[in-house]
Image: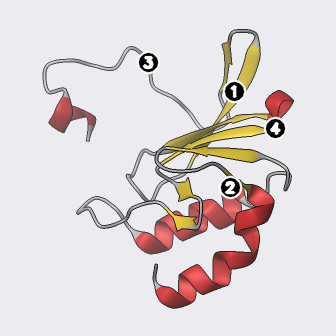
């Protein structure tokens, strides 16, 4: 997807799963969360009990998977395996809409799967 939007430029650096970035003295752990896009990531700040979730998890369900490069089962796996394992009080700052918490979203995983959200 990078090449589609930036055909004449390489990224400044590649992010890797588990990599820790320090921004303003706060450690942000890169979590690879494919589904919305193959290379999607979330940034987890344990010291702030915060997750910058982008388009992976919204308040009320998974992020958008209606694109040709998106995949619903993959985003559900990412949410279940990477995000819902975080502490329940982790605040999720979404790419769109209201914030939520891991605890608020965790009980709804099976209904998302059943509805094919």
Spatial separation of the CA atoms under disc 2 and disc 4: 15 Å
Mark 4, secondary structure of its residue: loop
Is residue 103 rendered to the left or right of residue 55?
A: right
Give the vertical position of 13 relative to 77 (above or below): above
- Most foreground residue, 87 or 99: 99
Q: Nearer the viewer, mark 1 or mark 3?
A: 1
Is residue 53 rendered to the left or right of residue 90?
A: left
x 14%, y 27%: residue: 7
- Most foreground residue, 47 or 11: 47
Spatial separation of the CA atoms under disc 2 and disc 1: 15 Å
Q: Residue 82, labelled with which disc?
A: 2
Spatial separation of the CA atoms under disc 2 and disc 3: 23 Å
Residue receiving disc 4: 49
Q: Nearer the viewer, mark 2 or mark 4?
A: 4
Give the vertical position of 31 relative to 64 (above or below): above
- Most foreground residue, 49 or 30: 49
Q: Nearer the viewer, mark 4 or mark 1?
A: 4
Place of residue 44 in the rendered image (x, y in percent of width and height, measured from the top left): 70, 37
Q: Nearer the viewer, mark 4 or mark 3?
A: 4
Q: Nearer the viewer, mark 2 or mark 3?
A: 2
Give the vertical position of 108 relative to 11 (above or below): below
Q: Earlier in the sequence, mark 2 or mark 4?
A: 4
Q: Earlier in the sequence, mark 4 or mark 3?
A: 3
x 57%, y 50%: residue: 98
Q: Residue 13, labelled with which disc?
A: 3
Q: Residues within 10 Å of mark 4 (few under 14, many from 20)?
A: some
Q: Residues within 10 Å of mark 1 (few under 14, many from 20)?
A: many
Residue receiving disc 1: 28
Place of residue 60 in the rendered image (x, y in percent of width and height, measured from the top left): 58, 67
Spatial separation of the CA atoms under disc 4 and disc 3: 26 Å
* Image quadrant assignment for residue 1: top left
């Amino acid at each position: 997807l990078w090449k589609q939007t930036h055909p004449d430029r390489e990224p400044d650096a590649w992010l890797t799963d588990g990599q820790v970035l320090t921004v303003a003295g706060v450690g942000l752990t890169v979590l690879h969360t494919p589904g919305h896009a193959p290379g999607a990531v979330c940034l987890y700040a344990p010291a702030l009990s915060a997750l910058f979730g982008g388009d992976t998890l919204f308040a009320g369900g998974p992020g958008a998977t209606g694109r040709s490069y998106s995949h619903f089962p993959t985003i559900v796996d990412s949410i279940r395996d990477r995000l819902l394992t975080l502490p329940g009080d982790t605040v999720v700052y979404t790419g769109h809409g209201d914030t939520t918490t891991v605890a608020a979203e965790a009980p709804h995983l099976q209904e998302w799967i059943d509805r094919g959200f």
